Image: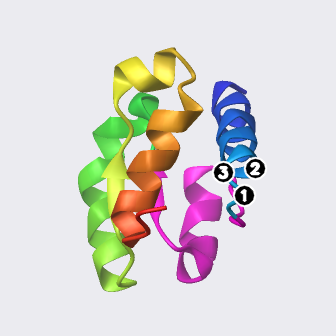
Amino acid sequence: MSTSLLVNTMKNEASARHLDYEFEALSLSALSKRMPEAACVLVAPQVRHRYSSLETSAKEAEKPIGLIDGVAYGKMDGKAILDQALNLIGDHS
């Protein structure tokens, strides 16, 4: 549920910046199916123990991946996390 709240804050921030991106919170099992469609993958702190295996999958799919900062996640800082996603995909909006 907390990840869904974070997605909403990222959507609001993207809308305020007039950026047209989609954001989804997915389970780890759903991620493997959706990764080919993703522009990038951000991993929530509560599953950081799975990061290395997710990183391997992301590299195989040629998708950038990052671990969300725990403080930004705890604050539900959609701006900071959106900036992280944009940096991963090379969009400097």
Q: Amino acid at mark 1?
A: His
Q: Position of residue 68 (x, y in %)?
A: 39, 38
Q: Amino acid at mark 3?
A: Arg
Q: Which residues are magenta?
A: 20-42
Asked if residue 54 can be seen in this view, the reply is no
Q: Position of residue 23 (x, y in %)?
A: 68, 56
Instruction: Provide the secondary structure element on which disc 1 rests.
Output: loop
Work out whether 69 lies above or below 82.
Answer: above
Residue drawn at point x = 73 percent, y = 27 percent = 1
Q: How is the image coloured?
A: rainbow
Res 15 label: 2
Query: Quadrant of residue 12 in the image?
Result: top right
Relative placement, left or right, of 16 versus 27 is right
**Residue receiving disc 3:** 17
Work out whether 65 lies above or below 79.
Answer: below
Residue 25 located within the stretch drawn in magenta = yes
Cβ atoms at labels 1 and 3 below 8 Å apart: yes
Query: Quadrant of residue 30 in the image?
Result: bottom right
Asked if residue 20 can be seen in this view, the reply is yes
Spatial separation of the CA atoms under disc 2 and disc 3: 5 Å
Cβ atoms at labels 2 and 3 below 8 Å apart: yes
Residue 68 located within the stretch drawn in magenta = no
**Residue receiving disc 1:** 18
